[in-house]
Image (cartoon, coloured by chain):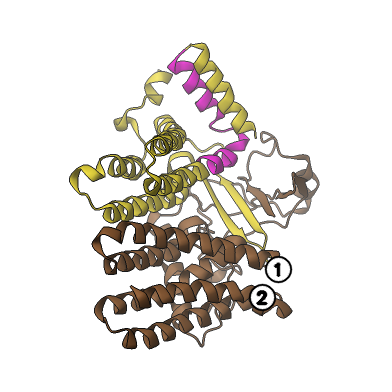
């Protein structure tokens, strides 16, 4: 039964529109980068489209998806003496978070920077330094969101979700290692 | 120097493993009514002393959804040079606001900053409506203006160089903004890093028409005065804002010299394309 409610199936989502936008922006940026040059040879056009998609995704995850899907939000503000203050906001722990939404959110949140990092590695190996600049921006933006939401969640609401998610997906040692790594990240 | 603070929902005091430093202050904070999902205590920004300010990368968080009743710092500790403040969220819940509200707050903030650049009379650091000092920032404007500037300069460039020109200008703008800001911080300016980048990026706005003008008009004799005038506008807008935002009095020229170089170089690029 628990498996049923947490399954990665779109129809089980509590906020299908928010989840759609969350997945849509992330996938669109990735796919435009990977397949863009097949349809056009215009580097500038692809660069601008991917850049705008990345920015839209960053804003969307930070301000909308995070709070609708897992009840977390973060932002930065400048204090009077010029220090920057990071604010991490989390919802009432008694609020019900949809298991499917949370699983989608955390899985995609952590896998996106990994995918962009692999693309960065590929760009280095192919010596495409111009594309590398775009991929580096993508890695920075997605990793910032991943780290900030990890920090948001330090009171451990999704900790259990992530642990059970990793434990359930496979019993192999590698997966267990990954799960404990994630939970250690949460602890920080 | 960055610091953290965590806003936590108020209800389950006993369940949440709060840091020690929070404990003494909890009693001194007025206890808000328990949170219920239906009672959305979001307060419209006009009625709250703090402006809807809180920028974040890419316009993001102007979400600083006017949090009513952020308690004062309840304890600060230092971890590896970073100051971390833990604060307790003592009322209101902004996580339930409609998406449109989140979106419009940031759109309005972007519009306000563009207006500040366009409008030399307005004191750029003070919000026109509330009279509050504005310290929030976003990077939407810098991103859009930087993309436009790079795009128009790359169109003006010979076809086989347009890619290089585009990525070169794009990278130059961000790297130069970072260095100019670093210079200001090292000279003792009390401005946050991203706030300074935000100001510099919004002040790029007058250079976009300069690049468009360079596309339309070929003779150098017309380009040069227009470019100089628009660079002067950029410089004026950025210096006015930065000065109020906490660059030290005696070091204004030293801090501003790289800013002149930055806009001057971009303006020169518009002339020679």
Secondary structure beneath label 2: helix
* Residue nearest the viewer, comparing B17 with B141: B141
Task: Answer yes or no: is residue B231 visible.
Answer: yes
Q: In the figure, residue B1 lies in which quadrant?
A: bottom right
Residue at image coords 40%, 35%: A125
Which is the main secondary structure of the residues drawn in magenta?
helix
Q: Which residue is mark 2?
A: B254
Q: Nearer the viewer, residue A184 or B261?
A: B261
Q: Is residue B205 visible?
A: no
Q: Quadrant of residue B154?
A: bottom left
Which contiguous range is marked in magenta?
Answer: A146-170
Q: Which mark is residue B187?
A: 1
Query: Which picture quadrant has residue B118?
Result: bottom left
Instruction: State the image coordinates of residue A74 (x, y, percent, origin top left).
Output: 54, 49
In the image, which lettered chain appears yellow? Answer: A
On screen, residue A27 versus residue A124, left or right, reads left
Q: Residue at x 46, y 68 (%)?
A: B109
Quadrant housing the N terminus of chain A: top left
Pointers 1 and 2 within a single chain: yes
- Host chain of mark 2: B
Quarter of the image with the C terminus of chain A is: top right
Q: Residue furthest left?
A: A39
Q: Is residue B105 magenta?
A: no
Residue A85 location (% of width, % of height): 64, 55
Residue at the top extreme of this rendering: A172
Q: Is residue A157 magenta?
A: yes
Q: Position of residue A131 (x, y in %)?
A: 37, 46
- Mark 1 residue crowding within 10 angstroms, few (<14) / some (14–19) / many (20+): some
Marks 1/2 in contact by CB < 8 Å: the verdict is yes
Q: What color does chain B have in the rendering?
A: brown
Badge 1 marks a residue whose secondary structure is: loop
Numbered circles on residues, count: 2
């Amino acid at each position: 039964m628990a498996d049923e409610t947490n399954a990665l199936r779109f129809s089980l989502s509590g906020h299908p529109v928010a989840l759609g936008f969350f997945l849509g922006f992330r996938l669109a940026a990735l796919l435009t980068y990977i397949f863009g040059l097949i349809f056009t040879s215009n580097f500038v056009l692809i660069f601008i489209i991917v850049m705008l998609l990345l920015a839209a995704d960053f804003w969307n995850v930070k301000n909308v998806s995070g709070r609708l899907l897992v009840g977390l939000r973060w932002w930065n503000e400048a204090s009077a003496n010029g220090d920057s203050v990071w604010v991490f906001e989390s919802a009432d722990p008694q609020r019900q978070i949809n298991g499917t939404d949370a699983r989608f959110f955390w899985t995609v949140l952590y896998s996106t920077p990994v995918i962009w990092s692999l693309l960065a590695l590929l760009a280095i190996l192919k010596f495409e330094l111009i594309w590398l600049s775009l991929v580096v921006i993508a890695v920075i933006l997605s990793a910032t969101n991943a780290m900030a939401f990890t920090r948001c969640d330090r009171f451990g609401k999704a900790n259990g979700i992530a642990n059970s998610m990793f434990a359930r997906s496979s019993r192999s040692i590698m997966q267990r290692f990954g799960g404990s790594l994630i939970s250690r990240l949460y602890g920080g | 120097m960055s610091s953290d603070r965590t806003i936590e929902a108020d209800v389950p005091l006993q369940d949440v493993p709060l840091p020690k430093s929070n404990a003494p202050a909890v009693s001194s904070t007025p206890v808000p009514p328990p949170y219920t999902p239906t009672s959305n205590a979001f307060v419209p920004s006009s009625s709250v002393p703090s402006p809807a300010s809180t920028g974040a990368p890419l316009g993001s968080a102007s979400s600083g959804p006017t949090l009513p009743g952020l308690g004062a710092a309840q304890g600060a500790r230092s971890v590896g040079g970073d100051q971390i403040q833990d604060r307790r969220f003592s009322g209101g819940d902004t996580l339930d606001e409609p998406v449109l509200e989140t979106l419009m707050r940031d759109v309005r903030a972007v519009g306000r900053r563009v207006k500040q650049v366009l409008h030399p009379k307005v004191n750029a650091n003070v919000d026109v409506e509330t009279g509050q000092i504005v310290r929030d920032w976003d990077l939407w404007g810098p991103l859009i203006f930087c993309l436009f500037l790079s795009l128009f300069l790359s169109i003006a460039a010979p076809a086989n160089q347009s890619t290089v020109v585009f990525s070169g200008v794009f990278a130059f703008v961000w790297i130069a903004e970072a260095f100019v800001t670093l210079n200001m911080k090292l000279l003792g300016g009390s401005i946050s890093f991203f706030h300074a980048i935000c100001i510099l990026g919004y002040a790029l706005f007058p250079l976009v028409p300069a690049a468009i003008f360079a596309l339309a008009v070929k003779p150098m004799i017309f380009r040069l005065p227009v470019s100089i005038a628009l660079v002067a506008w950029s410089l004026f807008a950025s210096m006015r804002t930065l000065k109020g935002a906490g660059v030290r009095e005696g070091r204004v020229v030293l801090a501003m010299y790289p800013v002149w170089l930055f806009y001057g170089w971009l303006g020169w690029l518009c002339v020679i394309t």
